[in-house]
Image: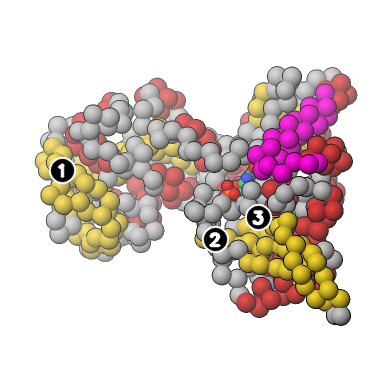
Amino acid sequence: MDTQTIVILDFGSQYTQLIARRIREQNVFSVVLPCTAPISEIQALKPLGLILSGGPSSVYDADAPAADPKLLELGVPVLGICYGLHFIVHHLGGKVLGAPRREYGHAEVVIEDAESALFQGLPPTLAVWMSHGDEAAKLPDGFHRTAVTASALAGFESAERRIWAVQFHPEVHHTPLGPQIIKNFVFSICGARGDWTPAHFIETTVAAIREKVGAGHVICGLSGGVDSSVAAVLVHRAIGDQLTCIFVNNGVLRKNEFINVQNNLRDRLGLKIVAVDASERFLARLAGVTDPETKRKHIGAEFIAVFDDEATRITKETGGVEWLVQGTLYPDVIESSSVKGPSQTIKSHHNVGGLPLGMKLKLIEPLRDLFKDEVRRIGRDLQMPEEILGRQPFPGPGLAVRILGEVTPERVALLQEADEIVVAEIKAAGLYSSIWQSFAVLLPVMSVGVMGDQRTYAYTAAVRAVHSEDGMTADWTPLPYEVLKRISSRIVNEVRGINRVVYDITSKPPGTIEWE
Ligand code: XMP
């Protein structure tokens, strides 16, 4: 079955991704394109409907985003939101004016046209979220007003021209009945079927991979995380043992992680995995290194070297590898094609599966249309264990960036023990899935303690737990005292070499989540 698509044109609003999510929650597929996308690119997607997002500009700004007004004449239903509304007014012969005062925040909207297809099933007044400076002063010919606030126009339409617009943001949480408006647009106006389910996604993706790869051979770097695991399982479903996964022990994985991942993915899900224990090689390279970025660079370079060796070996065995699987997600795709430009990189993040140096491999990115929570839904449909799907994010350079100062085998072992206790206690308290990341950090700070009659002189562990949506900002989590107490007491009693535990109460910004 074909996939029905709603196309969202991004005029730079911070809420654009939310529009995509609200539509997908209705089991309708949606994609975000930069507003500058050529009409041919939009038409190639055979959109069922178009949504023009909000944005920070004014239509009169010299650098106002340059979208092609012909997109209003494709005959496809259009919904303009905030800036999208101004765009419609401006290009169809109406007039947009700077509003006397900026409307920002909660507002009440009165629906004037109870017949409007966009407002079916809604009460006569709505609580909404506004965020704009301009307003529509004169509507284009053939349009009529459908909603107002106390001070301004809040919606208009021409059902005949298949164009609807609202000044407020139906996609945000602060517009509680916003989902109904999105539903009305997607189902009543655009006629969506609502059949973009995990099962549909798996079926179409598996078929597409099978067709693309044919009899070719594919490799995939596993990190043990959600994305690479789900990507590998999807590809495995399509082509079975034509896929070989490479899983490298870089010596700074969590305790038992090397074994657990193999158990889950090889033994339980049947993937063909080459597990390479390269810990010694990595730890030798990290000896004497204390600078965080240098640690990352060494681990990145070593990883590529190990991966390259394995890929070369698999190439010899299979007679040729053509494809590499990557677990790229949709936010990365949007970010790199966005009108806003790439966001600043503060740390040089290294992700598993970097293209091996000498190999010319074509990419398979089965998750490039999905958000993180959608990846988890797909994983559940693929019957993958919750242990993998629910896992908190873990950085590529692993425990190396949680051991301040030099990374030695002894310090890795200490941190693995402390970290295991933190995770176990947070899980036991039922908090693991509601926390973004929770872990221990080993500080090169020795202090005096007393155990029994013995004086101790040992390391300090810092415990860190944060709430976050995407890792870009984070709030430290106020863990219950009881949980902190158990963590502290267990670490000091069970991990010989750590005699003091402190709790990190720094948010991001100004801190970062990791200590290095
Ligand atoms: P920071 O410490 O920058 O972390 O606030 C934000 C998110 O990114 C993860 N992180 C990394 N992930 N390689 C990765 O794959 C890295 O070098 C790296 N550094 C940080 C961090 O765990 C958090 O989720």
- SS type, badge 1: strand
Q: Earlier in the sequence, mark 1 or mark 2?
A: 1
Q: Position of residue 259 (x, y in %)?
A: 85, 50
> Number of labelled discs?
3
- SS type, badge 3: loop
Q: Position of residue 369 (x, y in %)?
A: 54, 38
Q: Earlier in the sequence, mark 2 or mark 3?
A: 3
In the picture of the structure, the residue carrying the numbered disc 2 is 506
Q: Is 261 rendered above or below residue 240?
A: below
Q: Is 220 rendered above or below residue 40?
A: below
In the picture of the structure, the residue carrying the numbered disc 1 is 98
Q: Is 493 rendered above or below residue 180?
A: below
The magenta stretch spans residue 17:
no
Separation of residues labelled 3 and 1 (CA atoms)? 46 Å
The rendered magenta stretch, by its main secondary structure, is classed as: helix
Tell me, yes or no, whether the two marked residues, 1 and 2, touch with CB atoms within 8 Å: no
- SS type, badge 2: loop
**Which range of residues does the magenta coloring cover?**
287-312
Q: Residue at x 31, y 31 (%)?
A: 65
Looking at the image, which is closer to me, 481 or 50? 481
Quadrant into which the N terminus falls: top right
Q: Is 69 rendered above or below residue 352?
A: above
Q: Residue at x 58, y 60 (%)?
A: 466
Q: Residue at x 77, y 23 (%)?
A: 321
Looking at the image, which is closer to me, 256 or 367? 256
Q: Quadrant of residue 320?
A: top right
In the picture of the structure, the residue carrying the numbered disc 3 is 392
Q: Judge depth for marks 1 and 2 and give the one in front.
A: 2
